[in-house]
Amino acid sequence: MTAVKEVARRPIGHFTERSIAGLVAVTGAGVAFGLLLLLVRVRWSPLQDADHAVAEWFNGLVAPHHALVTVLQAVTDLGGRPVLIWLVTIAVVSLLIRRQPRLAVYLIITGVGGLILDPSLKTLVGRLRPVVDVPIASAPGNSFPSGHALGSFVAYGALLLVFLPAMAPRWRRAAIAGAAVLVALIGLTRIALGVHFISDVLAGWLLGAAWLGVTAYAFRLWRRERGRPVPPLTEGLEPEAGHDIAPAPAEEHVLAHPRSAVAELLVGWVLVFGALYGFGMYVSYHAKGTFFDTLDTEVPRWFAERHTGTLTEISWWWSKFGDTHAILLISLVFCPLVLAVWRRWRPVLFLALAMVGELTLFLASAHAVDRPRPSVENLDGQMPTSSFPSGHIAATICVWLAIAVIVLPRTDRWWRWVFVALAVVMPVGVAASRMYRGMHHPTDFMGAILLSALWIGLLCLIVRPNADVREGNRPSIESEDVATLDDELARAGRAD
């Protein structure tokens, strides 16, 4: 009987030990942040001197090197609100699709708390940002604490705690170390770019650790109250959910014959480039007096004669739908969702190859053909690339055509035709706007169609993005169950 009691006490004892250690760590972080806040508020001279000395040292080190500034800007963007909100939102939707609403609620509460703490404390403290000899970056609002340091610590830490169970045990320490290095680098870039003092960044890290510790402790208490075991944090918040939240646990090989597929893609890329180069050289320099020459001359003039303020503004917005940022955003939203629903990497690989292939084919053929822009007013000014083919149009065709190819055979619901319509409407709108703005000839549009049709067709033959559907793969959430996601979220905080 005594032995049974001892066994029953072990989980309680382990939880108590971990809880005490966790509370000590959280309390320590909170106390350290409070002390730092006090020192900043009273303007303690040694701290101010150290802050300004470090800011000046970094400014002198970084300012002369423009390439280094570019790298620092890229790293610091990983801790900005747009990236962090995108990561957390995609993770929440994916967790809801995978029937893990409590983990989704944990991410929402933790993320929203971080968003509230940052501006609130900035307003409370009212500390001005550093003033350096050579300004190389700027940021709005006050300085203390660093929002990038706080937000990155909270967001990446929470995502790590949620998704650790989906990783193989041998990769978990590497993931923890990688997240720690990333958060540290983001904080250091804020100092190096001259937009924060070192005490701002330290305060962001300490406050992030305290808030993340509080929310993780609350989640573990909830597990304990429901009679569930409370594992160490190195195993994640919900170890039993590992299989459900793993991206593609049932997929052993993305491609059956990867080496031959790579060779086929390289050969295909060369052939597509050859077709583009041949067509581009013909319409650019050898089509005088033909139908193509008439089309390329008259259509830009027809658009130029019909410029109005309203149409010019509309064309600017339509052009934005085909630029790099819009295409990247569409891909970064669609890929995680399709991975969450169908648990396969192949559709993601298909879309990624579609965009990489489009970009490389566009850059190579634009450089090789080197076609001048239409001889009308170019509303977008001087562009770094030549006219043939249109990169905006090709990217728009490729991304929406690839999405339609993936979605169409995977559901029988009416809304699948929306993606087919978008694969037609979006490229036509972008093409009309680019020609209206005097940036492309009609045959540049034809070149974009040729590029997209050949490259997407080649990828369909080699990658076969929907092979898993023919093999019987079913989505993690059926289309008719989408309406239940709100109910799942509403029940997240209630008992089982």
Image (cartoon, grey):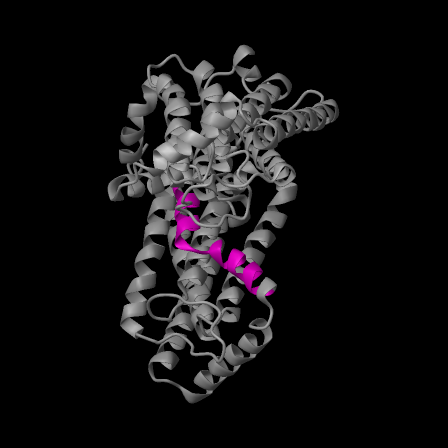
Determine the residue located farthest toward the front in the rendered image. 289
Q: Residue at x 40, y 67 (%)?
A: 30
Q: Position of residue 89 (x, y in %)?
A: 38, 41
Q: Is residue 80 magenta?
A: yes
Q: Position of residue 448 (x, y in %)?
A: 52, 29
Residue 244 in view of the camera: no
Residue 309, quarter of picture: top left
Q: Nearer the viewer, residue 140 or 453?
A: 453
Q: Residue at x 48, y 42 (%)?
A: 324
Q: For the magenta stretch, what is the residue range?
A: 68-89
Residue 388 to residue 424: above or below: below
Residue 95 to residue 162: above or below: above
Q: Position of residue 234 (x, y in %)?
A: 55, 48
Residue 154 in view of the camera: yes
Q: Is residue 214 left or right of residue 375?
A: left
Q: Position of residue 13 (x, y in %)?
A: 48, 50
Residue 255, quarter of picture: top right
